[in-house]
Image (tube, rainbow, N blue to C red):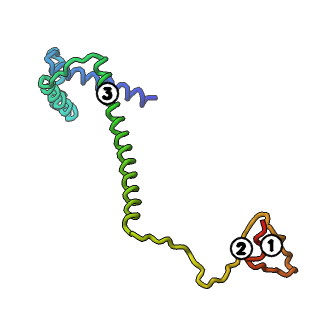
């Protein structure tokens, strides 16, 4: 509880010193207040730093240019125009990328057509000409699965039982 009170009191003292320093720089202090500020400047390094910063700001303000006054409508129109330009630029970049990707795909596809005058399609072949058995794994097999004791009968690929619809 006392920490908050001390912090508030400390903040009030800092604010009071800031106000007094500001008035001192503007030449609006009484002789007693002037002596107080000069005593702080002689003894307090943080106060000296704050004094230098405020002095620099005071000298910088007269040299700053004042922006021309602008109506709220003109300002909002300018802001929204800039947002629209940003949105259009983003769409142009995305669209340009899509067009570039399409062109690359088209050129790559056309290049492979024109690169070989006799393109040959290659199919996988069974060089031994031996029919390979077909193996299927289904939830509901077409043929009944034999029990462990029964003998397994393999049907050749050309048999009518296998090719039946």
How far apart marks 1 and 2 lie (CA) works out to: 15 Å
Left or right of residue 108, residue 165 in this image: right
Disc nearest the viewer among 3 and 2: 2
Label 3, on which residue?
81
The answer to whether residue 74 is above or below residue 46 is above
Mark sitting earlier along the chain (1/3): 3
Q: Mark 1 points at which residue?
A: 161
Q: Which mark is residue 135?
A: 2
Name the element at disc 1.
helix
Residue toward you, 119 or 14? 119
Across and down, in percent, residue 106 comes to 39, 55
Q: Residue at x 35, y 45 (%)?
A: 96
Q: Which residue is drawn at 35% across and 40% down?
A: 92
Q: The C terminus is located in which quarter?
A: bottom right
Whole-angstrom CA distance, mark 1 to mark 3, is 76 Å
Q: In which quarter of the view is residue 150 placed?
A: bottom right
Question: Which image quadrant for residue 55?
Answer: top left
Q: Which of 154 and 30 is in front in this view?
A: 154
Tell me if mark 3 has few (under 14), some (14-19) or many (20+) residues whose alpha carbon lies within 10 angstroms of its own. few
As helix, strand or loop, the secondary structure at mark 3 comes to: helix
Quarter of image, res 72: top left
Q: Where is residue 141 in the image (x, y as percent from the top left)?
A: 79, 67
């Amino acid at each position: 509880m006392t920490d908050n009170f001390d912090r508030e009191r400390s903040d009030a003292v800092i604010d009071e010193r800031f106000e007094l320093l500001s008035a001192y720089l503007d030449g609006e202090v009484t002789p007693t207040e002037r002596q107080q500020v000069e005593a702080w400047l002689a003894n307090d390094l943080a106060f000296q730093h704050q004094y230098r910063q405020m002095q620099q700001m005071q000298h910088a303000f007269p040299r700053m240019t004042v922006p021309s006054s602008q109506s709220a409508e003109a300002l909002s129109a300018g802001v929204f125009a800039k947002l629209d330009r940003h949105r259009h630029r983003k769409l142009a970049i995305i669209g340009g990328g899509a067009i570039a990707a399409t062109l690359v795909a088209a050129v790559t596809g056309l290049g492979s057509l024109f690169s070989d005058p006799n393109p040959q399609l290659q199919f996988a072949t069974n060089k031994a000409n031996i029919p390979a058995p077909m193996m299927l794994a289904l939830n509901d097999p077409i043929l009944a699965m034999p029990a462990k004791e029964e003998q397994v009968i393999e049907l050749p690929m050309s048999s009518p039982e296998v090719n039946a619809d």
